[in-house]
């Protein structure tokens, strides 16, 4: 999760909502992503999607059966859906998201068997640090003239 | 939907599960996508994601407020989540998907307000034609030696 937090900080430095994600396989990072929605003006450029795509490219397979995803913010329905599509089995996230979180907060997409596949999503890992990045970012943005 | 079906047929010719999608704005097609998962070996390369990304690039905005998405198969949770993230308000789909459909079949992601945004998903449009493409594709694949 520390590696994901580093990526979230990079996103913040680029003026993006600070969210970072990594994909891990056999204890090694095989994909990294940070939120790039504003810079690229593309709705799908969430940290998780970018990390999953990087991992697929690295491992040359759309199947990431033996991988885990770590992300600083609870995944939305798009991102947890991408985990199902990639057959990821374990997802670990930091802060909870009461606006769009799909792993318990707004929806329970993570708990439903899809495509004959189950995954487990575990939240609250380093949640204070992950959440503070976001609250500080939005506070600074509101205070800017 | 006819334009989306054409894209699905192109996907089939490339050995992909035949799904096609378009994004429409003010009556014009602004994004096209066809399933490219196998060829690219990337789990996120569904027709809808590719069409939404193309529309964002064309309109130079992650917000597709005034757009509609047409797709030959009921979107999964990733793809309907992408519609929420892009603030698309109307989604029209052809065949229903009892393995991964997130607009009523397996999940009801489309019905839940997310990110302070609602959308409506309408299924069953030209559904026989859309479904036949898929059933023929899987039948042919099973029959191959």
Image (cartoon, coloured by chain):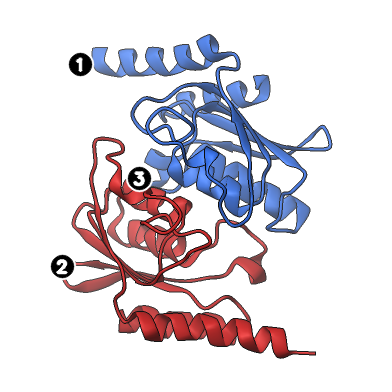
Chain colours: A red, B blue
Cα–Cα span, label 3 and label 1: 27 Å
Which label is found at residue A26?
Answer: 2
Which label is found at residue A85?
Answer: 3
Q: Secondary structure at mark 1?
A: loop
Q: Secondary structure at mark 2?
A: loop
- Is any part of residue B42 visible from this angle? no
Query: Label 3 is found on which chain of the structure?
Result: A
Cα–Cα span, label 2 and label 1: 35 Å
Among the 4 quarters of the image, the one containing residue B39: top left
- Does residue B87 lie above or below A42 as drawn? above
User: Which quarter of the image is occupied by the C terminus of chain A?
Assistant: bottom right
Residue A90 screen position, x and y as percent: 23, 59
Residue B30 screen position, x and y as percent: 74, 41
Residue A16 screen position, x and y as percent: 60, 77
- In the image, taking residue B108 as reference, residue A112 lies left or right, namely left
Query: Label 1 is found on which chain of the structure?
Result: B
């Amino acid at each position: 999760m520390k590696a994901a937090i580093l990526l979230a900080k990079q996103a913040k430095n680029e003026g993006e909502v600070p969210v970072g994600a990594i994909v891990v396989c056999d204890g090694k990072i095989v994909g990294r992503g940070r939120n790039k929605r504003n810079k690229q003006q593309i709705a799908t450029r969430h940290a998780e999607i970018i990390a999953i795509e990087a991992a697929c490219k690295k491992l040359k397979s759309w199947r990431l059966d033996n991988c885990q995803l770590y992300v600083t913010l609870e995944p939305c329905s798009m991102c947890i859906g991408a985990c199902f599509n990639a057959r990821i089995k374990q997802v670990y996230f930091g802060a909870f998201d009461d606006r769009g979180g799909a792993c318990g907060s707004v929806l329970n997409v993570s708990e439903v068997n899809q495509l004959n596949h189950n995954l487990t999503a575990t939240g609250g890992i380093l949640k204070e640090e992950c959440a503070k990045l976001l609250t500080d970012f939005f506070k600074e943005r509101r205070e800017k003239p």
